[in-house]
Amino acid sequence: MNEAITTILNHRSIRHFEDKQLSNEQIKTIVACAQAASTSSFIQAYSIIGIKDKEKKRKLAVLAGNQEYVAENGHLFVFCADLNRHDYIGNLEGKDVTTSIESTEKFMVALIDASLAAQNAAIAAESMGLGICYIGGIRNNLEGVKELLKTPERVIPLFGMTVGYPSKINDKKPRLPFEHIYHEEEYEQDKEVYLCQLQDYNQVISNYYEERTNGKRKDTWTEQMANMLEKQTRMYMKEFVQKNKMNLR
Amino acid sequence: MNEAITTILNHRSIRHFEDKQLSNEQIKTIVACAQAASTSSFIQAYSIIGIKDKEKKRKLAVLAGNQEYVAENGHLFVFCADLNRHDYIGNLEGKDVTTSIESTEKFMVALIDASLAAQNAAIAAESMGLGICYIGGIRNNLEGVKELLKTPERVIPLFGMTVGYPSKINDKKPRLPFEHIYHEEEYEQDKEVYLCQLQDYNQVISNYYEERTNGKRKDTWTEQMANMLEKQTRMYMKEFVQKNKMNLR
């Protein structure tokens, strides 16, 4: 197993960081790695906003649901789907690109591009001995995030990423069984197989929680998922995205 | 610079592969790396379909716009946004999760999850000396892909990824300037700065093409983008996604 694979398999989200900031050189390396990711038809439809300002981090932490590590970390990145650049380019080149950039297809392209870049950044940071945590919580209140980061139309902040020197390292969380995620030749639709795999996994997850909470918690994965999805969260998203002129047609 | 960062920065898309298949062990390692990526609230909202069958690869190559390397490679992965699993879990646990999994928010979550996993797979493969190329072309005809791979509702094949032993290695394509992708504290909206950065980059890209085509091609990046986006491609996507019960509300 090589170093890159060891880094990747060793991933866990880090939510406690030392009070030590990343150097500009570290930030540059991480962003260069993000930019090296594949991009659909060379479109590069994303932007990254880096936040050092303590006060701004604290405001973002509040918007993201009062998660302490959003304020206390070595650096905070915010990854955005960005087609504002291409709107500008359409005007510059005198071509009508509006229909295209307002399509669901290009919304997907921008999300995928931003995510590929982000994961490169994550692996790069982790390979330097830093820890990371994705902050989907910023989607709790994108109006607030948009105002704070002054993002224009056709830019959607997707998630934050806290990076820093870990002060506390959690255990790795077991993932779904390989056979449940990975299908051969075509999508596996046998419900009995499906159920068996989920039941096995439920046992793994239930044991995982039980061991780590001295028996206080032993919910299964399917319980956890059903409870989470029963709550209807961030239902404003469609309207927000469309108000920002993406995913319209 | 460590090995992981060297791998990441050394990325280029590989479109010519030796006729040598990946071993099952290689496939398992790549998928394990994909699964190690962060996932929003532990939702794991994606699936991966691995295709070995030559005939199926050939059919996918046709659907993706007759790209030879979709048929000729060491292995072909298709990454899918997948909320079908969570629909099933809702029924299993007797919870109404429908509104939630039909939301734009959860559509975004599934796209991000699938993309983070895919980029881990890409880095893992590249770190083993393999080459990769993302195949967005499968989105040219998702009805055809869906039929071929038998994906159910609430599953959207997002992109393929060809992996294999490189037989031809291209040059790296220069990315947008660091300052253009990376903003500090807030989104940079100074149009003059913006234009200068794009003009500098246009020169870089124009030189890049000119050198590699003996002067036959020297289009700039903004020209290339405007021409691409002027064409309205994959405009069926919104309807397709919604027919598959995602991004509805």
Image: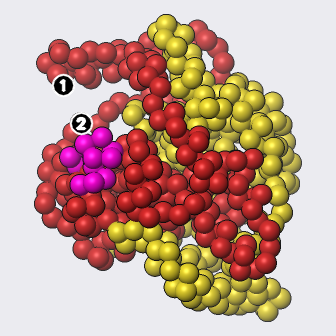
Chain colours: A red, B yellow
Q: Would you call the spot at circle 1 few (<14 residues within 10 Å), some (14-19), or many (20 or more)?
A: few
Q: Which residues are magenta?
A: A58-69
- Percent across and percent down for residue A33 are 44, 67
Q: Residue B196 is drawn in which quadrant?
A: bottom right
Q: Residue, x 17% and y 14% (percent of image)? A: A215
Give the distance between the C-alpha atoms of the residues marked 2 and 1, in whole angstroms.
Answer: 9 Å
Q: Is residue A182 visible?
A: no
- Percent across and percent down for residue B2 are 34, 68
Q: Main secondary structure of the magenta part?
A: helix
Q: Would you call the spot at circle 2 few (<14 residues within 10 Å), some (14-19), or many (20 or more)?
A: few
Residue A61 located left or right of residue B197: left
| Residue labelled with disc 2 | A171
Chain letter for mark 2, please.
A
- Percent across and percent down for residue A43 are 65, 66
| Residue labelled with disc 1 | A212
Circles 2, 1 touching at the beta carbon (< 8 Å):
yes
Q: Residue, x 26% and y 15% (percent of image)? A: A218
Q: Amino acid at mark 1?
A: Arg
Location of the N terminus of chain B by quadrant is: bottom left
Report helix, strand or loop for mark 1. helix
Foreground: B89 or B27?
B89
Q: Is residue B207 visible?
A: yes
Report helix, strand or loop for mark 2. loop
Foreground: A16 or A245?
A245
Location of the C terminus of chain B by quadrant is: top right
Q: Residue, x 47% and y 35% (percent of image)? A: A234
